[in-house]
Every structure is written in C-alpha cells, then in structure tokens.
Image (cartoon, rainbow, N blue to C red):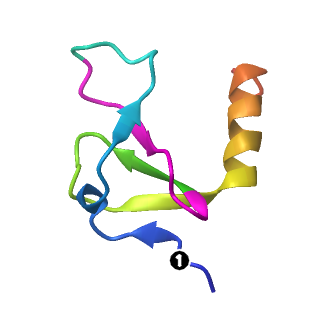
C-alpha cells in the first residue's frame, strides 16, 4: 500500500502557497512540487505537522473542479 502522508512535512523544502493567498493570511494550504509519486499538501499553520499525499491524477481532477466552480454553493 502506498504511503498516504508524510509525518513531518518540514522535512521537505520548497513548499509553496496559492497565489490567491494574501500576504497576511495565516490559513493557507501549501503544496510541494517535485515529489516522485504524489502531490504533498499541508496546512501552513502547522509546518511540522503531517502532509497528505494526494495522487497526481486526483490532484489534477480536484484543481479542474475548483477552476470549473464544481464546489461553488
């Protein structure tokens, strides 16, 4: 079974947050580019906490849904 999380996300260097996040915003989701098998995602408020490993195809589908407003209420 593939790993589904990284216990301490701070072990990876090079996290980035969305360009839609403001400079003062402390509540951001960050992603890490360059992982060989998935897209790591973490909460910026907890950099030493866990990161979820999202399969690349699942992440692509999620982003497409967000851009297409599939989650709008």
Query: In the visual, does 63 lie left or right of 18?
Result: right
Magenta residues (range): 25-38
Q: Residues within 10 Å of mark 1 (few under 14, many from 20)?
A: few
| Residue 61 x, y percent position in the rendering | 77, 42
| Residue 6 x, y percent position in the rendering | 39, 68
| Residue 55 x, y percent position in the rendering | 66, 59
Residue 10, picture quadrant: bottom left
Q: Is 10 situated above or below 65?
A: below
Q: Is 37 situated above or below 57?
A: below
The residue that appears at 51% across and 58% down in the rendered structure is 35
The residue that appears at 44% across and 17% down in the rendered structure is 19
Q: Is residue 27 magenta?
A: yes
Tally of numbered tags: 1
Q: What secondary structure is the stretch in magenta mostly built from?
A: loop
The residue that appears at 31% across and 56% down in the rendered structure is 12
Q: Is residue 24 magenta?
A: no
Q: Is 64 situated above or below 60?
A: above
Q: Which residue is mark 1?
A: 3
Q: Is residue 67 visible?
A: yes
Query: In the visual, does 10 lie left or right of 20?
Result: left
**Secondary structure under the numbered disc 1 in the rendered image:** loop
Q: Is residue 71 visible?
A: no
- The outermost residue toward the bottom is 1
Residue 24, picture quadrant: top left
């Amino acid at each position: 079974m593939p790993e589904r999380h990284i216990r301490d996300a701070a072990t990876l260097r090079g996290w980035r947050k969305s360009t839609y996040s403001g400079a003062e915003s402390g509540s951001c989701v960050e992603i890490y580019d360059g992982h060989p098998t998935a897209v790591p995602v973490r909460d910026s408020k907890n950099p030493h906490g866990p990161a979820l490993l999202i399969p690349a195809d699942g992440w692509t589908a999620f982003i497409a849904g967000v851009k297409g407003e599939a989650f709008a209420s």
